[in-house]
Image: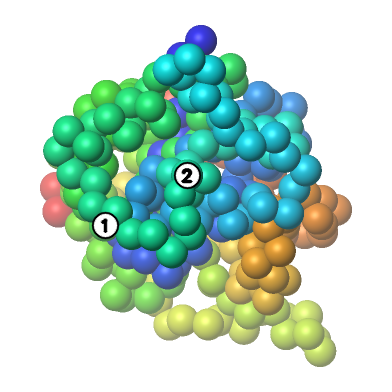
Amino acid sequence: MGLPKKVIFVYSGKGGVGKSTVATNLTFALMQLGHSVGLFDADLYGPSVPLMVAGLSATMPTMEGHRVQPGHFGAVRVGSIGFIGEETSGHVWVGDYLTGVLHQLLFDVDWDSDILVIDLPPGSGEVHHRIAYAISGKALLVTTPQDVSFADTRRGADMLHRLQTPIIGVVENMAANVCPACGLPQPVFAGDTLERLCRPLNLSLLASLPLLPSLSEQGNRGIPYVIQYPDLPLSQQFRNLAGSALAQCERTVVNWPAL
């Protein structure tokens, strides 16, 4: 067994927009919809996924011969450099070292899944190029509704375009804070994701997710929000996003205007 036929890259142009939170909950939402799913944390320099699933009942990754077997967290297979070595250790992965790490942790792995979600690092770099050239996947962009995030996301979209990686849509994260008293959404940032990002790039806005303290709290606890609170509205939003992302993966993605 090798890589699944369906691969979804979750990508952001800048850090701090909640990309790994979206990737993790998207993966477990796909599982709740009945799919067999794997999750790979491709951020070799600052892996977050191991912390976000640490509270689940798990079987840790193992080596069988020269092949890596991903860990089992709930019903999801998870791989990350974060399972190897000390939490505080820093590594410089470039060139042949980077190739070797990706080969062992991503390419030469028994994922045994129908879908693989890859949490790409923010920005652009060697990791993006090596993965995009080797894997035929489609990308989901994560942004917050603010101009500084839009600018980085547009640059990231241009990188994906150059790598011939189709983009299936945009997730607007931290769109609004839900007032605990009245229940009405209050915008956190002043940007317009539809007008400033989606329409210029001819992309669909697949989800607009609120800023909820409980979402961050669950990340700290290591239990995905959709697992802890499966019946709450945000979990249904993640499942809707999962369904929309899969539907977009089946379509031929139209190219967007040059940036």
Which dot, 1 or 2, sits closer to the camera? 2
| Callout 2 secondary element | loop
Q: Position of residue 15 (x, y in %)?
A: 37, 65
Q: Residue at x 27, y 24 (%)?
A: 134
Give the residue at the far bottom of this rendering: 181
Residue tagged 2: 84
Q: Which is more toward the observer, 55 or 9?
A: 55
| Callout 1 secondary element | loop
Could you tell whether 95 is left or right of 175 in the image? Answer: left
Q: Is residue 98 visible?
A: yes
* Circle on res. 70: none
What's the residue type where badge 2 is placed? Ile
What's the residue type where badge 1 is placed? Gly
Q: Residue at x 45, y 35 (%)?
A: 8
Q: Residue at x 26, y 42 (%)?
A: 127
Residue tagged 1: 123
Tell me how the rendering is colored: rainbow
Q: CA distance from mark 1 to mark 2?
A: 24 Å
Does 103 appear above or below 159?
above
- Which of the marked residues, 1 or 2, is nearer the chain's N terminus? 2
Q: Which is more toward the observer, 130 or 200?
A: 130
Q: Position of residue 126 (x, y in %)?
A: 19, 43
Q: Position of residue 132 (x, y in %)?
A: 27, 32
Q: Is residue 5 visible?
A: no
Tally the numbered discs. Answer: 2
Could you tell whether 13 is left or right of 214 in the image? Answer: left
Q: Residue at x 48, y 59 (%)?
A: 87
Estimate how packed mark 2 is, as few (under 14), some (14 to 19) or many (20 or more) residues with alpha carbons within 10 Å.
few
Does 174 appear above or below 37?
below
Name the quadrant containing residue 149. Answer: bottom left
